[in-house]
Image (cartoon, rainbow, N blue to C red):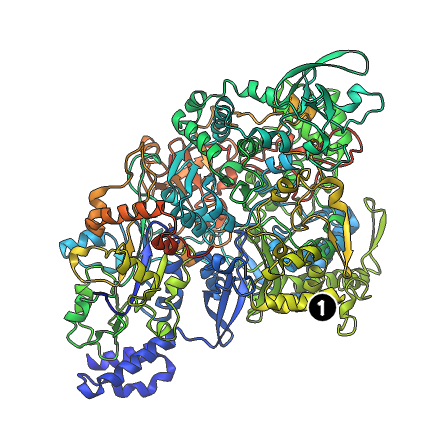
Amino acid sequence: MGEMKRRDFLKLLGAGAASASILGAIPLLHGEFRYVRKRTKDMYAGMVAYDRSVRSTCAGNCTQACGWNACVNGNMITGLIQASDYDVYDPVAKNAYNPRGCMRGASYVRYIHGPGRIRHPYKRVGKRGEGKFKRVSWDEAMSGIAKQMGDIIEKDGADSLVFFSPIPAYNYVSAGAGYRLANLLGASGPLSFYDWYCDLPPGDPITWGTQTEESEEWDWTNAEQLILWGSNVAETRIAAAHFVTESKYRGTNLVYIGTDFTATARIADEFISVTPGTDAALANAVISHIIKKELYDKEYVKLFTDMPFLVRMDNGKFLRENDIIQDGSPFKLYIMDENTGNPQIAPGCCGDERESLDLQKFGIEPALEGEWSVELKDGKKVKVKTVFSLLKERMKDKTPEWAEKITGVSAKAMCNLAENIAAKKTTIIGGGGVNHWYNNDVNNRTMILMLALTGNVGKNGTGFHQYTGQYKVWLKGLGKYGRILKTRPENGTLFVWTHYIMNLWKLGKDFNEIVEDVESGFLKELPGGHADGMNAPVSFDLKDHEGYKNYLLLKSLAKGWMPVYPKPPKRPKAMFIWRGNFLNQAKGGSQVKKWFDDPEKLELVTVIDFRMNSTAVFADYVLPTAGWYEKFDVTTTPMHPYLQAQNEVIKPVNDTKTDFTIFKDLARAVNNEAEKRGGLKWFDAKYEKNRDYTKIYREFIDADGNENPYFKSVCREGCLETAEMAVHFTLKHSPVLYPDPDGYMKYKDQMAPELRMIIENMLFKGDTDGYIKGLTDLIKKHPVPFPSAQTMKRPLNPWRENIEQKIPFPAGGKMHYQKKNKNGYEINELFISRYLGVVPNGGKTLTGRQQFYIDHSTFLTLGEEFPMYKEPETDLLPNGKPAPLKLNTPHERWGTHSTFRDMDLLLRLQRYSAFVAVNSADAAKRGIKDGDTVRVYNIYGECKTMAKVAPSVKPGEVWIQNGAEMINFFKGWYNAVTPVRPKPTQSVIYPEEENPPFYHLKYGWNLWGVTGNECDTSVEIEKE
Amino acid sequence: MSRKGYAIVADLNKCLGCQACAVECKIWWASKQQGLHHAWWIITETRPGTGYPKKWVENVKKGLLPDMNDYEPKFEFRYNLTDHSGNDLPRIFPDPMPKYGPNWDFDKGVGQTPENAWYFYLPIQCMQCDDAPCVEVCPAHAMYKTDKGMVIHDPTVCIGCKSCFHSCPYRRIFWNNELNQPAKCIMCEPLVEKGEAPLCVRVCGGNVRFFGDLEDPNSAVHVFAEEYNVALPLFPQYKTNPRVLYIPPVLNPPVNGKERYDKPYLEEFFGKDVWRVKDILEKERKKRNSKLIRYLGGNYS
């Protein structure tokens, strides 16, 4: 016994433990006892010892951006410990953001050195998707890819190469390097992701004319009522969830509106379990009750919303100046002035240059309700009503009793909710649960409306915030480095719809010709569809519901309101995918997968990743990239205003290289290939530019030093030759890093001394590069709050400045474009870090207010001028019957989209594979028991996975984790049953009239675009 | 009289069930020793539920010990994604698929529909009991208690008799079959010595877990356990005097105006004191400037 014991103990201690052998003697004498305990302590201490630790940032697309100290032994990272250092350079928020992190971040160690890591470049040798690869050298991989690229450029043009990398904000240069190469090639893309992944709340641009605005999460504690609506914060925002539980302790009324009894429902004061897809009915009822009981804030509504604006009863359009006066502007709208009894042009609306909502200043007292007769310029008289009067009429029968039948929520609960919203400072946190629906724009708009009616927008502790996706590109310098807008930025949803689902290239015509064919009645069916042998209808006739929607989408594409490249009759020939998992996450997966299955369709698929994800399985080349602790880059998030670094804690493991290096190498490889061919050129018609591929490497690295001259004296080849230089360039061109000089004087106490030093000694003395270098050095150690954010009142809350200073929404029109030039750098008049997401050429909504009535012809035709509840869409079963169960694909705890889905430690803490969650009663009806293998199917396709049977799941609904990987399913995967269902209201440009001074809605890459929703999907399940 | 030494308090009203504690501990401790593949020194159970090891609460009462399969069945993930042979896509789940796992029942709970469903999360680890059965029964004095309250196992004197494994009513002593010795949470004693909090506390993003000296009037554990007496031991009926304490999960959303939870179940787990704590929490939540709420509420502005 003693002998065995000793040997085993040596095993435990490892190689250095030889001297411990003398301790094997048992039993011990009392004198030796203490000595042995000391050895034990050393042993335990040795297990958790490490050589050094370096701070870095976790960069999953969960939006949280948490700091970790990576603990290194030798050249291995053996563990991560939360950095909890958000207070170091932030004397304002202090400890609020500590702690910060979750189990997914902690588990990343297993990706760095674990079994799922890709360590070498691979080339496919088997069939696509079979998982048979051979190891190749970097040279072989790069020259192989470049050769194929050269062939495609010669044969089809460079715009047949499509680039996709989502969420640049979690490591800017890793994304930007690829975007930059795409630009130099003249390729298509980058595809947008925020709308395609349906995280863009379209109600935000529709109401406010801006991508998404949100408060920092610390502001949640200022709310008297916090409504988590379809947002499972306790699982998806683990680092932020303590603000929720803590505000509850501090007295905030915490309401969770969702389907299932989740980890978030558990911590709420009130849990409202709503029938899937009926949230807008609930919201309509709340609004109806607010109006009926006159709980709205009259003064707020008059000033800050479009409620007093006049609408023509004959055509449903706003009354415009050009209706009344010859040569009047179509962008000047009216309100009824009670002082004079006449309609007056609303100050600060799109065409009005007064740029203020201060009606008192202009002596106007707007009527909120009423009906009048107005004489038009041709002498005709029309009736007009205020938006509010119309809203009141429409909401009259949308009572809580009406909604009770639809939502399954008691009318009393809805009345209670309405009264609480009116009485308490209320914040709504919207989530994927209400956003991933076809009618997501209606959902968001109703929620914003109920808040705006009660004055709950634009004050700390209020507002509608949706944090789904790390969408916000605080560092605008990315656009300059990656030259995104000068490439072929396009709407991801319609790209997939056009090419992979509808196969429009097969028609052999361009968009305009296709639209003409539809309008003439010649084309009645598109050449593709979601199910095999079921081509999609298309029709110019409004009565043909499906067909007309497809027509509207085609029209939008033809007019260029939504860009898609390459344009039919061309089609994509190659895809470059990095930092993302395109195929796995693609709605309409059954059809999209066909393109990846078939090397005739997509001739070249290149995946760059640190792990073998489900898209990589279908790649021709898999290039291994450095992980989050093996490279230098910068990270930001909408959830908190800190700039953070990812540091190169260890060198990239094995054969891996950073994304930056890979794209630099690829630029060189294409350059070499072009030279080998004796020159390679392509005429880029969009930019009317003859692209010469023998020059792209020099341009990639800025060999001339025109772009980033700071490094001219130290660089070897070019001024953008390293990631560090690219980061410097990106930071330098990001206005959010420059404090507003006036605000600085007022708020400099909010700045850490380290930050003040570099601002006052460098920036204010004109040494911008020195300032950026100083900032870079700071973020390598600890997070730095954006200097411009720190010259504002914190916590940050959107629209606060608009309300306080009565500035037109979103960005005060012309004021947005005014710049100050002080101390050698430019700064916008308004707080620059707000309004990052204003739509292109935007600045004001049509009314200059939060706008709930949209008089766009498409909205009017489809009955969506107001946000009114519409039934969710349904899908069919192969037998033609409607599928009975809603398939929800929620974000949940065990992964960040598809990242971490293959993580052994986390899989062991769930079910080792993907699963479908089913309510106990629904399962019993179908003879399904917990742990059974089930088939989930509809007309589009099927998947097989394990059933998790639980009472906490809503009857009538099943769910599969959003992002569950193909490699985790027994067969197929969840996107095999989802369609791509683009909604025409999201493909428009607004105002419709030509040359408006400002656009309210206009395509902007990830700012405004058609969303790729999937929650309307319905399925049936059966036991295998 | 105030207790001395360190303690951990977990607020089950805030716990998110995220398993960050489990994952961090597994990476830093249990994965560093051979023979501990099955061991999660700390894990968060969904309760009511099977628990980990399987049905341990029920089995302790019957005097049954867990066998290896009760922790986790044998499995192997198939990460051969670049060298796969077969016509279909490679898949990584184990074959055969386990039918049970350490957290198999997460978020299941009891009830019929979401409207009346109920569960809570229970992070569970070695309770560092002051009257620890494992220390009492160890014939070799291998299990010992430090003056700061940690219960530590000393493998250099262990005789591998399994007495501790048999004695623990919380089943938080894991038997290492390869080394023939026990292993368990030691409250990160070496890190605490250096002045750092245990890893499960530092990794807790939900601000659920508090660590400190029970005698320090400024420490959260003192405020919870001594000043307001809202931190309760798990299964007080075992009378082992644990140093890992819980603020019980009593702030659930009601069902049609009635309490959501199963009262006898909560009483079994935390004793009748649960209702006293509930009253205190509800009362303090309504107060302005409550010291208790300041500590529970994150202690920032």
The x and y percentages for residue B189 are 33, 72
Observer able to see residue A620: no
Choose between A311 and A531: the one closer to the eye.
A311
Q: Is residue B232 above or below residue A1003?
A: below
The x and y percentages for residue A283 are 49, 29
Q: Is residue B19 above or below residue A856?
A: below
| Chain under disc 1 | A
Q: Amino acid at mark 1?
A: Met
**Quadrant showing the N terminus of chain B:** bottom left
The x and y percentages for residue A518 are 72, 24
Observer able to see residue B32: yes
SS class, disc 1 = loop
Choose between A1006 and A362: the one closer to the eye.
A362
The answer to which image quadrant residue A816 occupies is top right
Circle 1 residues within 10 Å: few <14, some 14–19, many ≥20: some
Q: Is residue A964 left or right of residue A373?
A: left
The x and y percentages for residue B44 are 33, 54
Give the total of numbered labels: 1
Residue position for label 1: A762
Question: In percent of the image, x 77 and y 30: which residue is there?
Answer: A512
Choose between A234 and A592: the one closer to the eye.
A234
The residue most toward the top is A380
The answer to which image quadrant residue A803 occupies is top right
